[in-house]
Image (tube, helix red, strand yellow):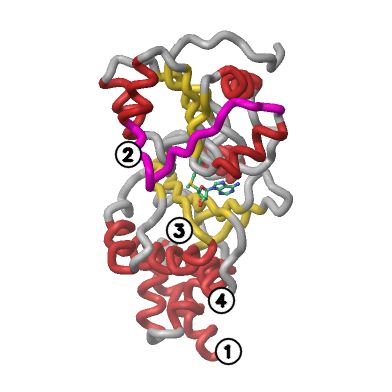
Amino acid sequence: MSNAPITLEPGLYVTATPIGNLGDITYRAVNIMKSADFILCEDTRQTGKLCSAYSIITPLEPYHDHNAAKVRPRIIERLSEGARVCLVSDAGTPLISDPGYKLVRAARDAGIAVIPAPGPSAIMAALSAAGAPTDQFYFAGFPPAKQTARKKFFAQLSDIPATLVFYETGRRLGDSLTDLLGAFGERRCTIARELTKLYEEFVEGGFAELASIYVESPPKGEIVLVVYPPGEKKFSQLEIDEFLATALKNSSVKDAANAAAQSLGIARKHAYQRALELSKAK
Ligand code: SAM
């Protein structure tokens, strides 16, 4: 297998690129990028770095949220004339919370071949190493930035019996975890940060515990939030204590204990006893 240029059939090649580690590119992706007539990308500087790493000299043309509607008809025209076009995004798989859906739809409607060249995506990297169940998962994209919309968004997802995967920014992570706690009750989750990069990190815990950390100090870098399905795992004493401590900030011992019993599935008597101890120790 080599990555020397090849002859491509005409069509739109939807090509995945690395999400951090430049080594995570397939031979086929490099071949397609070298052999296409031009590469559509979100940011020519960003894709330019990947191209120089792999000696790709194919012309780059911008295709992003701000110019897509304007340039799409001409791209479809060139594809209809037999062009071989490679679509990439800044990182990962195009169309996954990235531009490209309308282009793929328009190409299919025009009878043009659309060929996937699969590879990295932050969803799969996070799921493959977090340790959450993977038999069923639901990718929910980015939670809304505004709190009212975000609370409504989470409320609609609370009953899904599958692992949930979100993209989130470090700045909003604490707020999302707090709103998830409000919408779902307590659940386990994993914060998968800076995947495939130097400071890659997986942090696992309950919503209350992790919200209290990240509201205070928002993490840097890129984040995938993986939320375990309802009732998947029992909570440790430390997680129960974190939940009670958070609840006790704004509620009575009785209310905090009731909330813990309901959210964590623990005995009300045990929750009350522990809440009482914690409130006395404060
Ligand atoms: N199309 C990309 C893919 O297939 O993963 C996703 C693009 S979306 C605009 C960017 C978001 O993906 C980031 O805000 C973050 O939530 C997630 N992401 C991308 N790269 C990541 C990485 N290396 N580590 C963790 N999350 C990442």
Dot 1 or dot 3: first in sequence order is 3
Dot 3 or dot 2: first in sequence order is 2
Residue 239, image x and y in percent?
Answer: 55, 66
Dot 2 or dot 4: first in sequence order is 2
Q: Examine the image and state in which quarter residue 263 appears.
A: bottom left
Asked if disc 1 and disc 3 are in contact, CB closer than 8 Å, the reply is no
Q: Amino acid at mark 1?
A: Ala
Q: Examine the image and state in which quarter residue 177 appears.
A: bottom left
Q: Give the distance between the C-alpha atoms of the residues marked 2 and 4, in whole angstroms.
A: 43 Å
Residue at mark 4: 216
Query: Residue 66 or 210: which is nearer the viewer?
Result: 66
For the record, the magenta segment spans 55-72
Residue 46, image x and y in percent?
Answer: 60, 43
Dot 1 or dot 4: first in sequence order is 4
Query: Residue 132 or 265: which is nearer the viewer?
Result: 132
Q: Give the distance between the C-alpha atoms of the residues marked 1 and 3, in whole angstroms.
A: 26 Å
Query: Residue 175 or 281: which is nearer the viewer?
Result: 175
Dot 1 or dot 2: first in sequence order is 2
**Closer to viewer: mark 1 or mark 4:** 4
- Label 3 sits on a secondary structure element that is loop
Q: Amino acid at mark 2?
A: Lys
Q: Which mark is residue 187?
A: 3
Q: Examine the image and state in which quarter residue 1 appears.
A: top right
On whether residue 57 falls in the magenta region, the answer is yes
The relative height of residue 129 versus residue 267 in the rendered view (above or below) is above
Residue 63 in the figure: left or right of residue 35: left
Residue 211, image x and y in percent?
Answer: 51, 69
Q: Dot 3, how many residues are within 10 Å of its Cα: few (below 14), some (14-19), or many (20+)?
A: many
